[in-house]
Image (cartoon, grey):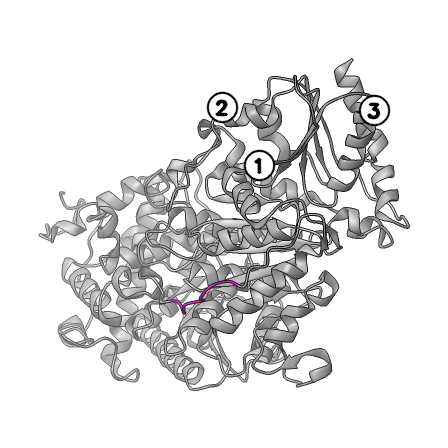
Amino acid sequence: MSAQPGQQAHTYPTYLEGIDTFGQAWPHFDTLGATPVIGEGETAIADAGDKRAAYQTLLVADALRYLTLQITGAKASGHPGGFASSAEAVAALTLLGHKNLTTEVGHHAPGYYSAMFLDTSLEAMGIKTVKDMRARFRERHGLLGHLSGAIPGLLAPAGPLGQGQHFAMSGAYLHRDKLFPVTIGDGGMGEPYILSSFLHFITAYPDVTNFLPVLVWNGYSQEHHSMVSLFDNDGMQRYWHAHGFKRVILVDAKDYDDAMQHGAYVDSSLFSFGKRLEFAAAVLKGIDEAAKSALSGTPTAFIIKQLKGAGVHKTGAKAHNLYPADTLDAPHISSALERRALSPETWQLVRTLCVRAAGGPAAQVAVTESELKLAPINELPLKDFAVGEKAVPSTALGTLIAHVGKNDPNFVVTNADGNEASGMANINEALKIRHPSEDGLYHQKPEGQVYEPLNEDACAGFAAGLALFGGRSIWLSYESFAINGWPIFQTVAQAMAELRRKTPSAVCMFTAGALEQGRNGWTHQRPEIENYVAAQMKNGNTFALFPGDANMIQAAYEWALGSHNKSIAIFASKSPLPVYTTLAQARQAIRDGAIALYESAGTGEIDVVLAAAGDMILLPVFEAKDKLETEGKRVRIVAVANPRRLYRASDIAWDTVAEPDGAFMNDADFDRLFDARALLAVSGGPSATLEPVILRSRARRDVMCWKRGETTASPNEVMAFNGLTAGDIAERARGLLG
């Protein structure tokens, strides 16, 4: 490329192709930048107090700012402002060798992509030049608008605010010898569960302190001031201290401002060069101190306080997002790039530093770039319950979960509403609730494997994070409350669909469905979570399982344990219910997607198929069968156990995901199960889980499902309120038959 008007022509390495503007070397570059502060064969800055280290940290910070604005400006789209105010902190973490870096802020993505470019990680996806990075930013098969599982070197996705801390804690739990920083924007501090989840984890795992929250306190959210913008420094530090952090190190750019900026938040890029260097030195020393503190057993947080947008095109919330007019030739963008422009020699120094840090590119050294070795869990203690007896599905599952925990010391069960209330006290008895107060009556031990924060986001987040980072876990929840934790499961499911490695599936089980919650009323009768999961089944790696009995739930968990890179939600009851299948039949149901539980004696055409998703709903279904048979009608009852397998292959994006599952029931097998004069699909929850049955059936068909909750004295009364009694089902079947 040619130099800009008035610039000296430069020669430069090929990877810099696509940089619009080069600048001159900084003052003192010939001494402070002459040699990389991370020497050949070294992995980190040796002395955080070295003036050369501060100088080169600042160079890396400005390189990150430049690239962030260069690639977002190339598309006039994306979010440069938030990351810009964190640049010194991310540069310091990188040069101190801490590349297992997560973030809570999806909008900081272009900054992290820039970091991965500088250390050559992006070459693994064919991005070798700045031009390549510009072309593939916010494009399919490129650098997504938010962090995902697809980008080499980046540990975790970042979607809805308030999630990143779970990934940092999961990584710290599984890898006790490494630091897991997580950057958190103060715009996200309006989400109260960020710090509450930290506090519960610190209390439950006092020996796991190797995570480091880095608060990017810049005063603004996406479109306005942040909710904590009026806190003073002491107040912010007290806020973190109150949530379990013994040390809180804060570096405020205001303390170094010699540009006479107004307000509590200032832009360090406007300081004199000497003051910029002082600020960078303070951040580097503070990060180094915080990292060592966290790694040595003290819960520690670091706060960088600097105006949003520092060093890019605008400041405050106006720096957050680029719009169509914010192109590279717009004066405010091009002038900002000129201010941050670096010389080719500087770029080469920066790249050398970033490649050497931590021992190589993040795409090679980050913990999530390889599979975690798992403990063998040996043969599951499956029990083949006799057909016709009654057994509690959730309790049968609990026995298997307890076995996994006994064999895998890293395995964690998360639960917010109590396993005992869900018929799974056997889990607590075997694995113990992790609690600082040891109490045998309540099965509490400081070393327990059952993690019980009263917050579904914290439960789902830790369980999903462990799975994403390569460990085994299971999230157990009441169906009615699970919706509060599902967004992070959804985020992780999408990330797992894009991963370049195998990881255990994220598994959850929701019990106490709407039909079991009569006395508690509509507050506990919310099966919307089933709709949510059903909507994700078409993504390709999400499965909703509806085991019909205690044998089938064992088969469901056995299958889930052996799977990879999937999101699997199991729905089952905590009540004693009839066993309809043998263990072999149960496995067939999960494998094939559905199984016939009953067919009327005789020959000739089946009059009506009753296709049911769930276990408790089978009670009125079987009663309805009795009523219809007394009228001479032939009935087949089919349990829809794994509806994802009942779709047509063309309905699902199964071949677009990692570890693809392309098993779908063929037309002949589908017809053998569901063909009849009429088909009635029945669910104790929403109808979405039955969509593939309704979609593929060619019979006259209808669906009966949940409508809404009400306080009732029994499950039968709940069913009556929703029109799901045996009489209702039989009447609807008669209507279909004319």
Q: How far across and down, in percent of the image, does residue 584 sit?
A: 54, 47
**Residue 306 visible in this rendered orientation of the protein:** no
Q: Earlier in the sequence, mark 3 or mark 1?
A: 1
Q: How far across and down, in percent of the image, does residue 601 sit?
A: 70, 27
Q: Inspect the magenta stretch and tell me whether residue 477 lies in it.
A: no
| Residue highlighted by disc 2 | 667
Q: Earlier in the sequence, mark 1 or mark 2?
A: 1
Q: Quadrant of residue 616?
A: top right
Identity of the amino acid at label 3? Glu
SS under mark 3? helix
| Residue highlighted by disc 1 | 594
Q: Which residues are magenta?
A: 374-380
| Residue highlighted by disc 3 | 731
**Residue 497 visible in this rendered orientation of the protein:** yes
The structure residue drawn at horizontal position 60% and vertical position 71%, both measured from the top left corner, is 450
Q: Earlier in the sequence, mark 3 or mark 2?
A: 2
Q: How many C-alpha atoms fall within 10 Å of the one at disc 1: few (<14), some, or many (≥20)? A: many
The structure residue drawn at horizontal position 63% and vertical position 33%, both measured from the top left corner, is 690
Q: Label 3, label 2: how many angstroms apart (C-alpha)?
A: 29 Å
Q: How far across and down, in percent of the image, does residue 219 sit?
A: 54, 62
Identity of the amino acid at label 1? Ala
Asked if the residue under mark 2 is in contact with the one under mark 3, i.e. CB atoms within 8 Å, the reply is no
SS under mark 2? helix
Quadrant in which the C terminus appears = top right
Q: Label 3, label 1: how many angstroms apart (C-alpha)?
A: 24 Å
Q: Which mark is residue 476?
A: none
- Closer to the camera, 518 or 469? 518
Q: How far across and down, in percent of the image, does residue 295 sit?
A: 41, 82
Q: Please name the predominant secondary structure of the magenta segment in the image.
A: loop
